[in-house]
Amino acid sequence: MDLMAEDCEFRSSLGAEPGTTFVGRDEVRRGYELFLGPTDEPAPETEISGILVNDDFAVVRWTSLSPDGSSVEVRACDIFEFEGDRIKVKDTYRKVRGELR
């Protein structure tokens, strides 16, 4: 949270908007805790597959693997918008393996 601006936003990949938006440091912290908090399942392995950085934004591509590394569960990217030396916006986009309906 030390890297986040006071009036930061976290635009998550799940929720009714689509994707719930959390605004302000307290709400962004709550949003991170909802998505990254402890679960009963083993934590997946996450690998960064690319980072693109410009003056006022960055894109980080990542893959989340099952705990045993046998299959891809999620491919995603986070788009960060900077304000000075802080992160103003973290916007997440992801693809999750599953059946289409």
Image (cartoon, rainbow, N blue to C red):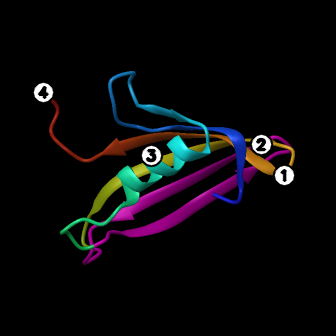
Q: Residue 85 carries which label?
A: 1
Q: Which of marks 3 and 4 is nearer the N terminus?
A: 3
| Position of residue 95 in the picture relative to residue 53 (left or right) | left
Q: Earlier in the sequence, mark 2 or mark 3?
A: 3
Asked whether the beta carbons under mark 1 and mark 2 sit within 8 Å of each other, the answer is yes
Q: Distance between the residues labelled 3 and 4?
A: 28 Å
Tell me where residue 45 appears, x and y as whole percent: 38, 72
* Residue holding disc 2: 82
Between tags 2 and 3, which lies in front? Answer: 3
Q: Earlier in the sequence, mark 1 or mark 4?
A: 1
Asked whether the beta carbons under mark 4 and mark 2 sit within 8 Å of each other, the answer is no
Q: Is residue 12 above or below residue 37?
A: above
Crowd rating for badge 2 (residues with CA inside 10 Å; few <14, some 14–19, many 20+): many
* Residue holding disc 4: 101
Between tags 4 and 2, which lies in front? Answer: 2
Q: What residue type is labelled 2?
A: Phe
Crowd rating for badge 1 (residues with CA inside 10 Å; few <14, some 14–19, many 20+): few
Tell me where residue 14 appears, x and y as whole percent: 35, 36
Q: Which of marks 4 and 2 is nearer the N terminus?
A: 2
Between tags 1 and 3, which lies in front? Answer: 3
Q: Is residue 28 above or below residue 62?
A: above
Q: Residue 61 magenta-drawn?
A: yes
Q: Give the range drawn in magenta.
A: 43-69
In the structure shown, which secondary structural element does the residue marked by tag 4 occupy?
A: loop
At 44% from the left edge and 46% from the top edge, which residue is drawn? Answer: 31
Tell me where residue 79 appears, x and y as whole percent: 62, 42
At 35% from the left edge and 61% from the top edge, which residue is drawn? Answer: 37
| Position of residue 81 in the picture relative to residue 15 (left or right) | right
Between tags 3 and 4, which lies in front? Answer: 3
Q: How far apart are marks 2 and 3 (CA)?
A: 19 Å
* Residue holding disc 3: 31
Q: What residue type is labelled 4?
A: Arg
